Image: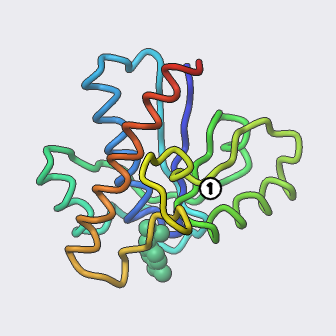
Amino acid sequence: MVKILFVCLGNICRSPLAEGAFTHLVKQAGLEHRFACDSAGTSGYHTGELPDPRARKVAQQKGITLPSRARQLHRGDFYAYDYILAMDKSNLHNIIALKQRVAPDSNAHIMLMREFDPVKDANQEVEDPYYGDMEDFENCFTTVYRTAEALLDYLQKNP
Ligand code: 4NP
C-alpha cells in the first residue's frame, strides 16, 4: 500500500482538492487496495473546518465530494506516509524544516506535487487560490487533477 499526503498551508483549498482528485482517480481505476491518501496543512489556522466552499463547489461540478476536515501536519505523518507532496515552495520549505526538527529519520519522499505534472512552468507550484475568485479555483482543480493523473500513473509504474 502506497500512502500519499497532500500538504498546503491551510488544508482548506489546494490539498483537499488534490486529495479529492487522487481519491477519485484511484476509485475509478479500482485501486483502493494499493493507494491511500490524506491531506494536511502546515498551519493549524483552519483545523476542523470543511474545505473552502469554492473548492467544494469546483470539485462537486466534476462529481467529486470533498469530505475532509482541516488538520495540521504532525510528526507521525513523516512515518505514516511514503510521499508528502507540497503544493508550493513555501509549504515544501516548512515541511522539510519540521521533518528535520521532529522526524529526522523519516524516509518519506518530500517533494513538490507538481514535480509529477507533465505540464512544466517556471516554478512548478500550485498557486494559492484563497485570495482569488472561482476562476482561480477552477484553474487549481485543473492543475491538481492533471497532476494527480500523472502521479497515479507514475506510482503504478514505479511500485
Ligand atoms: P490552502 O489556502 O493553503 O490552499 O488551503 C489557504 C487557506 C487559508 C489561508 C491561506 C491559504 N489563510 O491564510 O487562512
Q: Is mark 1 on a helix, strand or loop?
A: loop
**Residue 1 placement: quadrant:** top right
* Placement of 72 over or under 107, stated as above or below: below
**Residue 105 placement: quadrant:** top right
Q: Position of residue 147 (x, y in %)?
A: 41, 46
The residue type indicated by label 1 comes to Leu
Q: Position of residue 76 (x, y in %)?
A: 70, 43
Front in this rendered view, residue 146 or 64? 146
Residue furthest to the bottom? 131
For residue 111, side relative to residue 8 (left or right): right
For residue 46, side relative to residue 1 (left or right): left
Residue at 70% across / 59% down in the picture? 95
* Placement of 35 over or under 106, stated as above or below: above
* Placement of 145 over or under 54, stated as above or below: above
Residue at 59% across / 69% down in the picture? 43
Front in this rendered view, residue 66 or 159? 159
